[in-house]
Image (cartoon, rainbow, N blue to C red):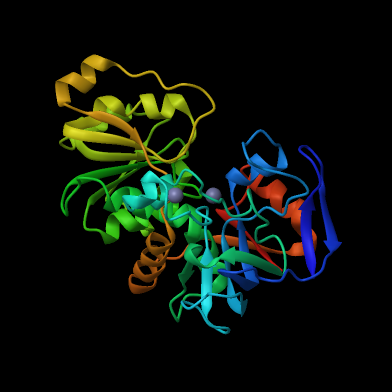
Amino acid sequence: MRAAVVSEPGADFEVVKRDVPEPGPEEVRVAVEACGICRSDEFVVEGGYPGVSYPRVPGHEIAGTVDAVGEDVDAWEPGERVGAGWHGGHCFTCEACRRGQFLQCENAEITGLTFDGGYAEYATVPAEALAAIPDGLDAVDAAPLLCAGITTYNALRNSDARAGDLVAVVGVGGLGHLAVQYAHAAGYETVAISRSPDKESLARDLGADHFVNAAEADPAERLRELGGASVVLTTAPASDAIESVVGGLGTDGSVIIAGIPGEPVSVDAGQLVGTRGAVEGWGSGHARDSQDTLEFSALRDITPEIETFDLGDVDAAYERMAENEARFRVVLEP
Ligand SMILES: [Zn+2]
Ligand SMILES: [Zn+2]
């Protein structure tokens, strides 16, 4: 099979021929039809993430079909359409797992980081890390939903916001353009906040009721004028963008960080005390959360805007993501 391999941190991709991997016990071999490129793949390409060994095949937005199953796999059969995201499996026995908090597993695997991922024609994945892909959702559309989609969908549905509440999304990019669609579909009064005024018509097409051009207006002031936000989901990985919305929370509101800035976030504690507000984080979800994301996306016709590339063009594809030029998610088709 063909696979795009990173031989060591900082190295270029090498597209190589490899043996098709055999699934071990409780593993499933997936014939990869599509794999999204995510900013978190930088952890493999540039190094620095604990638990990653090399050479490594990145890719944690895998969509494909079950090709073969290992011993003791009852849940999946060859031919079924499946996906795998960031959460690549759990031990079932640690304290977090005993409480059903599989994402917090002390021995969690990460797809494309602790084992080879989807920048390849085949990948073997622990059976508990797979989500079923519903009919009617193409593999290339499903792939980005397994990281960018689940992160925003799961953050919003686990928040305290109820239908009709004011919910804002900061950034209309890879995560944000999905978050706006989920917020609209959930029945929230939806605000898109961006520094690019040219994103306004797209944001409104995706379901935003309001658009705030953060290059000109103070987003916190605009949110207060609209009554104060129950939730502001920040997808732009910039601390000043996060800091700029804390003053826009309504009573008991939360700023939920989904895009991680490279520097600390500083918060005016007085604003938090005044609103009983919070600044918190959210990341991804487990395989059933992934499946919920895919099912809801199919139900409400929510898809990502994507650019597709052949696996052989992985360098160009990765560059589109790394340079922030993609509109909005890049997907490899092995
Ligand atoms: Zn990701
Ligand atoms: Zn565990």
- Left or right of 213? Residue 158 is left
Which one is nearer the viewer's eye here, 203 or 94? 94
Which one is nearer the viewer's eye here, 268 or 53? 53
**Rendered location of residue 193, percent (x, y):** 37, 39
**Rendered location of residue 303, percent (x, y):** 45, 65
Figure quadrant of the C terminus: bottom right
Where, by quadrant of the figure, is residue 150 drawn?
Answer: bottom left
Which residue is depicted at the point 57% across and 53% down?
327
Residue 221 seen in the figure: no
Which residue is depicted at the point 60% across and 69% down?
25
Compared to residue 3, the image places residue 45 above or below, namely above
Which residue is depicted at the point 34% across and 29% down?
217
**Rendered location of residue 167, percent (x, y):** 25, 44
Which residue is depicted at the point 54% across and 27% down?
262
- Left or right of 34? Residue 87 is left
Figure quadrant of the N terminus: bottom right
Residue 36 seen in the figure: yes
Where, by quadrant of the figure, is residue 204 drawn?
Answer: bottom left
